[in-house]
Image (cartoon, helix red, strand yellow):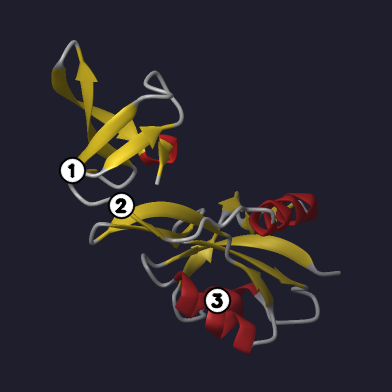
Amino acid sequence: MKRWYLLYCKRGEQTRAKMHLENQGLACYYPEISVEKIVRGKRQSVKEPLFPSYVFVKFDYEQGPSFTTVRSTRGVVDFIRFGSHPKEVNGDLIFDLQSIEQCQDVADCAELPDKGESVRVTGGQFAGIEAIFHEADGEARSIMLVNLINKQIPVSIDNKDLDI
């Protein structure tokens, strides 16, 4: 009977390990999540591993391949173990992770406004206020100039709260 196991992989070699495991006829699952980042001034949706350096693999060790064969696959370090035997992962967990991954909303890549452009704030403590875009503040926030008592005050606002 095929069972799910969790493998620990060499840093940055999860995709290589997954490819070599699939070449051996094994079912693999490498969960990824979409993360919104700002790359070169543009907001982009980038896929990143949900569990860096880990890959789920499904196989029957009695029919083959053996634990040693899987562990010796290029990019794989070892199984996650409790004691001397690899720990089985509940199949419901894998099903739940796969359904969550499929239900993710993937945002369209949107550009940030130009410096000095007026933007409406749609959420947070400044909701409903018109602000002036000043500059990006990391990957998920922007510095906006907000008029408070006839003075422009720089405020860091989450990009999801901006009407771009």
Q: Residue at x 42, y 23 (%)?
A: 127
Q: Amino acid at mark 1?
A: Gly
Name the mark nearer the viewer: 3 or 2: 2
Q: Amino acid at mark 3?
A: Lys
Residue 76 against residue 86 in the figure, above or below: below
Q: Amino acid at mark 2?
A: Leu
Q: Crowding at label 1, few (<14), some or many (≥20) Cα neighbours within 10 Å? A: few
Which type of secondary structure does the marked residue at label 3 adopt? helix
Residue 69 in the image, given as x and y percentages of width and height = 59, 81
Name the mark nearer the viewer: 1 or 3: 1
Nearer to the camera, 163 or 29: 163
Which type of secondary structure does the marked residue at label 1 adopt? loop
Write down the residue under mark 2: 112
Alpha carbon distance from label 3 to label 2: 36 Å
Number of labels in the image equals 3
- Numbered badge on residue 18: 3
